[in-house]
Amino acid sequence: MAIHGNQTRMTVRPPATENPTLLYRRTGSFMVLVHGNAAPSPSDWQHYLDDVAVAARRTRLRILVVTDGPGPNAAQRETMNKRIPAPFLVAVVTHAVMARRIVSVLSWFNPNIRAFAPADLPAALDYLDVRAEDQAGVIERVAEMRIQLSGAGVESVLDPMKAVITRLSQLRENIERSRRS
């Protein structure tokens, strides 16, 4: 999946545990983190932070977080703030009130973190400087990760995203038309 450039695949990071509470993928400076309705387990969170810390030393990260749950607990947030250099761009897509509150607290340490409603996923991707022609691919990866994480069927994950996917397909068509003109 190209975010910028010709790279076509996101790096798959294996879960830290057999029943993961989160999944993440990275390509270059762009990372996608998905977790469900439970807080990240300590081992999953540590595994994620280890990879973020390494990536943050090499590049200015842009992270898309998609979550249904409360997010990291206070101890996990403290560890993150100590280990990960800020600021870097983070867009958190969630409907969860607690996750939005956590974003507010984290913004004290990283002013470049913002919360978005699920319907505003394209705006979150714009904030992270993901090209319009790459946004549908990112959404597909998020859906795949949510299915893998939850064991849910495709329809239960994609139904809430159908309007967003339709809008992105239209954008993709408009881009193709403008290139041909």
Image (cartoon, helix red, strand yellow):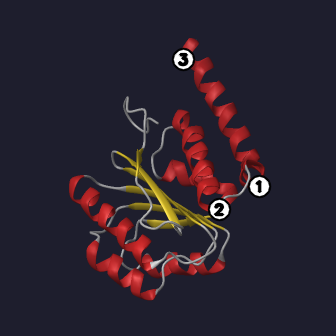
Q: Quadrant of the C terminus?
A: top right
Task: State the residue lying farthest toward the left.
Answer: 57
Q: CA distance from mark 1 to mark 2?
A: 10 Å
Task: State the residue lying farthest toward the front.
Answer: 18
Quadrant in the rendering for residue 50:
bottom left
Label 2 packing within 10 angstroms: few (<14), some (14-19), many (20+): some
In primary-sequence order, the first of circles 1 and 2 is: 2
Specify the amino acid type for callout 1. Answer: Ser
- Dot 1: element: helix
The x and y percentages for residue 175 are 58, 25
The x and y percentages for residue 87 are 32, 66
Q: Where is mark 2, residue-wise?
A: 150
Label 1 packing within 10 angstroms: few (<14), some (14-19), many (20+): few
Closer to us: 16 or 139: 16
Which dot, 1 or 2, sits closer to the camera? 2
Q: Where is mark 1, residue-wise?
A: 156
Label 3 packing within 10 angstroms: few (<14), some (14-19), many (20+): few
Q: Are marks 1 and 2 in contact (CB under 8 Å)?
A: yes
Numbered badge on residue 179? 3
Q: Residue, x 46% and y 36% (percent of image)?
A: 1
- Dot 2: element: helix
The x and y percentages for residue 125 are 53, 49
Quadrant in the rendering for residue 156:
bottom right
